[in-house]
Amino acid sequence: MVAKFRLIDRVIIKGSPRPMELFCVDLDYRSVPVDGSAPLQLSWNTRNRFKARQFLESAKHDKLRDTFDVSAAFEGDPAIDAMRRRYTVEFFQLFNMGYQNY
């Protein structure tokens, strides 16, 4: 999973004994088409809002469990795959070379 992140800086936080590394994940959001389907014909009353919040909270708790495999979710998502396709090995090597000279 670490290979999916790119080290972009090393900073020193006041009071910290050692530097902290900052990473980013490269994703090109323009590589994924916008969903053009019609909005749901749903009346957003109190009950439906409550059900939607329950669903979102349940999905969040599933992702916070110790058994959740972030790596598998990252690699199995076709949208993430499409958004990362633009970033080649050459891009990462060139950036790393520039970072090393920084």
Image (tube, grey):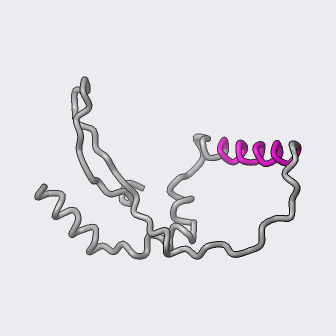
Seen as rendered, the residue at the extreme left is 101
53 falls in the magenta region: yes
Vertical comparison of 93 with 47: above or below: below
Quarter of the image where the N terminus is located: bottom left
Q: Residue at x 27, y 53 (%)?
A: 8
Left or right relative to 93: residue 59:
right
Q: Residue at x 78, y 48 (%)?
A: 52
Extent of the magenta region: 47-61
Question: Which of the 4 image quadrants contains residue 97?
Answer: bottom left
84 falls in the magenta region: no
Magenta region, mostly helix, strand or loop?
helix
Q: Position of residue 31 (x, y in %)?
A: 50, 75
Q: Position of residue 65 (x, y in %)?
A: 61, 41
Q: Position of residue 15 (x, y in %)?
A: 25, 23
Seen as rendered, the residue at the extreme top is 15
Q: Residue at x 50, y 74 (%)?
A: 82
| Closer to the camera in the image, 18 or 34 | 34
Left or right relative to 95: residue 48:
right
| Closer to the camera in the image, 28 or 2 | 28
Quarter of the image where the C terminus is located: bottom left
Q: Position of residue 92 (x, y in %)?
A: 28, 67
